[in-house]
Amino acid sequence: MKIMHVIPGSGGSFYCGNCLRDSKFVEALRASDHKAVKLPMYLPLFADEHDLSREIPVFYGAVSIYLKQLFPVFRNAPPWVDKMLNSKPMLKLASRFAGSTNAKGLEEMTVSMLMGEHGQQKEELEKMIDWIVENCDPDVIHLSNALLLGLAGRLSERMNIPVVCSLQDEDVWVDVMKPGFRKQVWDLMSEGVAHVKYFISVSDFYAKEMLTQMHIPEEKMKTVHIGIFPGEYEFMAPSEKGRNIGYVSRMCEENGLDILVDAFIDLKKSPGFDDVKLILTGGSTGDDTNYLKRIRLKLKMNGLLKMVEFHEDFESQGLREYFKKVSVISVPVRNGEAFGIYLLEAMASGIPVVQPALGAFPEIVYSSGGGLIYEPNTPAVLSETLKKLLSDPDELNRLAIQARKGVEEKFHLKDQVDKMIGIYQAAIQSKN
């Protein structure tokens, strides 16, 4: 079977869970003797430097389509201008600036993208399809998220193959938009439902949310959890490490880094935690610069800046080294998430997770048994939960063992890929 995955890239400036999810699935499909190709959009893919050497262009280059949307004069620019703006070094540089991965200010472009062949990027859409027709011959096309549904109708029409679409955290992008645009975007995504054979949610929680939000027929909705290969992660019991608290995700307000920092400050005021450090990783974008400055200032004012480590390398081996430093991880995302692949990576490394009772976090934690759920999502409650766990080494080690076991039994990537292959086969048979 030949599968084309269309994946928006992050440029590698921060830990991109969605990019990582798609890349791991593609690698596992290839290992199962299927031909799977990643087609990047907007920016190069996170953690995929080895793929960037391949002759696969980045379509809908973020710099080029932004300028064309904002300044019509760029729509008639000569080809060499597009080539320069869409070069991978230029796109990776752009990913580090403010706004490159933020929906604020990109509302009109999001609407235009969802309009597909009727939007401002219609020429880029035809160029992408031409490339797929000339260079690949996929049996099915897999869109990374519903914000790409503007591609579905034309892809299905020209190529006469089924389109499937993953669902993960579209609401995070849409909900920060201006109110007038929110409804327009949700309406356009709902219209795109007709062109998709199956939607694949990363959790049961998010499947229920999107059935209502996008008016998706139940027969079109499937759930395939995110998975990893546990063997790629080295188990290390907390008793072999320092009592350090970790955070691994993009360091931004939406992901609740300040909640964890406030909890850490509160924890350090209690006796018996002098040895505990906070170790942060996950990178950031230009949008997060001022936020991180405030975080550092708060830590400095509380005399704790030296007790906090910013671990810079969050890709591949750098992330594995990071996991050797921490005994428990918490990413207190303010509104929860549809999943969170970092939880699996941590648990496979023998690190229990402490997450708020929001989004799919309870589904993941209760299914694996590898952590604790707390509520409400406040620094005080998080601090107390961390104190109890760090004060009980036996429980910490028990949860670490269960975390690894839970990932092996419930979230092994091979099992999830087998489910995905079944969905592809059903889609192809139905189309035939």
Image: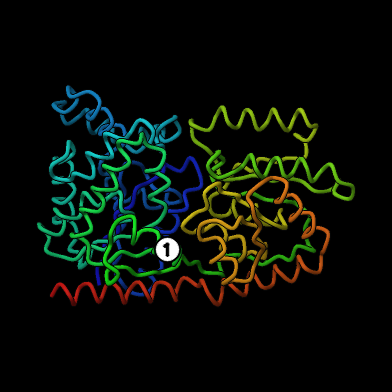
Residue 222 falls in which quadrant of the image?
A: bottom left
The spot of residue 128 in percent (x, y) is 19, 48
Asked if residue 21 lies left or right of residue 160, the reply is right
Q: In this view, does 340 lie to the left or right of 129?
A: right
All told, the count of numbered labels is: 1
Q: Which residue is located at x 40 percent, y 64 percent?
A: 208
| Residue at 62% in and 75% down | 405
Residue drawn at (27%, 30%) of the image: 84
Instruction: Report helix, strand or loop for mark 1.
Output: loop
- The amino acid at mark 1 is Val
Residue under numbered circle 1 = 202
Q: Give the percent coordinates (x, y) of residue 58.
A: 29, 44
The image quarter containing residue 430 is bottom left
Query: Where is residue 157 drawn, in percent x and y?
Result: 10, 58
Viewer-closest of 398 and 57: 398
Q: Is residue 274 left or right of residue 254?
A: right
Reply above or below: 256 against 236: above
Expressed as whole percent of the image width and height from the top left, the position of residue 103 reads 38, 37
Q: Which residue lies furthest to the right in this view?
A: 271
Residue displayed at 25% across by 48% down: 187
